[in-house]
Amino acid sequence: MLDIKRVRQNPEEIKQAVRNRNGNLDAKIDELLEIDNQRRDITGKVEAMKAEQNIASKQIPMYKKEGKDVSEIMARMKTLSDNIKELDAKLSECDKAQRDILLSIPNVPHSSVPVGNSDADNVEIRRNGTPTQFPYEPKAHWDIGAELGILDPETAAKVTGTRFHFYKGLGARLERAVINYFLDTHTEHGYTEILPPFMANRASMTATGQLPKFEEDAFKLSNNEYFLIPTAEVPVTNMHRDEIIDGKQMPLKYCAYSACFRAEAGSAGRDTRGLIRQHQFNKVELVKFASPETSYDELEKLTNDAERVLEGLGLPFRVVCLCSGDLGFSSAKTYDIEVWMPSYGRYVEISSCSNFEDYQARRGSIRFKNDIKDKAQLAHTLNGSGVAVGRTVAAILENYQNPDGSVTIPAALVKYMGCDKITK
C-alpha cells in the first residue's frame, strides 16, 4: 500500500506510474485526494473541539469551587461531545474509504524498471548455459511422464479435476528430491528453513497484496475466512505482521517449502497440459526482510540464490527484468528467471524475484528498529521462487531425456534419488 503522503504530494507521479502498468486510476486517485481533504478537515475540527473540551473540563471544578453557575458550560460540553461523536463516525467512514482505494492502487515501479506494455518489452539481463539441442524431435514432459508411468493427470482428473497430477514411483521421488535439494542448498547459504501453514487468514492475504485485488484467483474455505495459500510468501511474510524487527538481525532470510493453490481464473486455455500451470503445485520460496538502504542489493543476492539451484542442476536459463506493464501488482521491481523448455522451443518462467519496498510492510505494519531509542520504520520485503518444483521437474524431464525414452538424473539429485536414471 502506498503512503497517502506520497500520493498527496505527487499525484501525477502516481497516476503516470499506474498508466505505465497499463492501467488508469486517475479518477480513483482524484477521489482519494478529495476524501483525504475531507478527512483532514474533519480531523482539524475534532482536534479543535477536543481542545475546547479540555479547557472546559478544567474550568468546571474551578467555577464550582467559586460558586459560579456551570450549567452553560455543561450544555456546551454536551454539544461538543455530540458533535465529536458525529464527526468521529464521519472520520471512520473516510478512513475506510481511503484505505479501500489505497488497497486498489498498485506499487510504483522502481526508476530502473523499463517502461513497456507486455512481456515482449522485458529486458534480458543474462543467460546461463545454452539451449539444449537434440538430433531428434524432443518429447514434451507430459508425454515423457506418461511413457515412463511417473505422471498421471487422468487419474487426478477423476479424483479431483483438471490441472492436477498424481506423481508415481520415481516421479514422486524426483519431486521430493528437488524439494530437498532446494532446501538444503538455500539453508547452506544462510536461509532459515520454515514449514508454514498452507492456509492463511484474510488479514495475511491482504498484507501481502493477494486481497482484495486477486480474490477470484484464490481458493477460499467455505466455512471460515481462511484461504489456501497461493505461495509460501503469504504465511512467511506475515510471520512479522504487526511486529517490530530488531534491525541488527536484518536482513532476515527464510526459505520455505509449501504446496501452492491457485484458481488461475484469468488463464483459461493457457498451458493446459503438463506441469506448467496447475491448480496445486509445490514450490520452495525465499523471503527476506531488509532495510530500505540495502533492499536492492538484497534483491540481486536473492536472484543469485534462486539461480544457484538451477546452475547446480545444469539447466539452461536466462534472467529478465520485467517491464512496467508486466510487473506484479505489489512489486516495485522483479527479475524473472526463465528455464529452457525444449518442447516449447523457448524459455519459460520458473521463478520471480521481487522487491516490494515498503508496500507490503505498510499493509502489514512490519517495522524495524536498529536501536531501542530509534523510531520504528517500515521494513522492505522481498521474495522469490527458489524455485517452482513442478516446473523444475518438467525442465529436467525435457532437458535430460534420452533417445531410448529414459531420463538421466542430474548429478546434484542422484544422492536424493538413489539412482541416476529413470527408465521404463
Image (spheres, grey):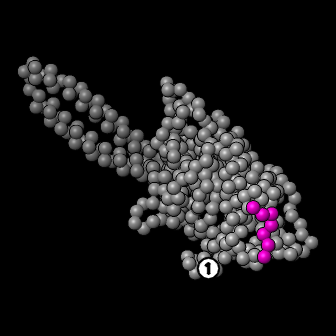
In depth, the one of 375 and 74 nearer the eye is 375
In the figure, residue 387 lies in which quadrant? bottom right
Q: Main secondary structure of the magenta part?
A: loop
Tell me if residue 422 is in the magenta stretch: yes
Position of residue 274 in the picture relative to residue 237 (left or right): right
Instruction: Name the residue tied to disc 1.
Output: 155
Q: Residue furthest top?
A: 66
The quadrant of the image that shows the C terminus is bottom right
The answer to if 192 sits in the magenta stretch is no
Position in image of residue 399 (x %, y %): 82, 65
Q: Residue at x 61, y 47 (%)?
A: 193
| Residue range corresponding to the magenta coloring | 418-424
Q: Is residue 200 left or right of residue 84?
A: right
Q: Quadrant of residue 58?
A: top left
Q: Is residue 148 above or below residue 3?
A: below
Q: Is the residue 108 above or below the residue 198 in the image?
A: above
Left or right, 334 with respect to 77, comes to right
Where 349 sits versus 246, above or below? Answer: below
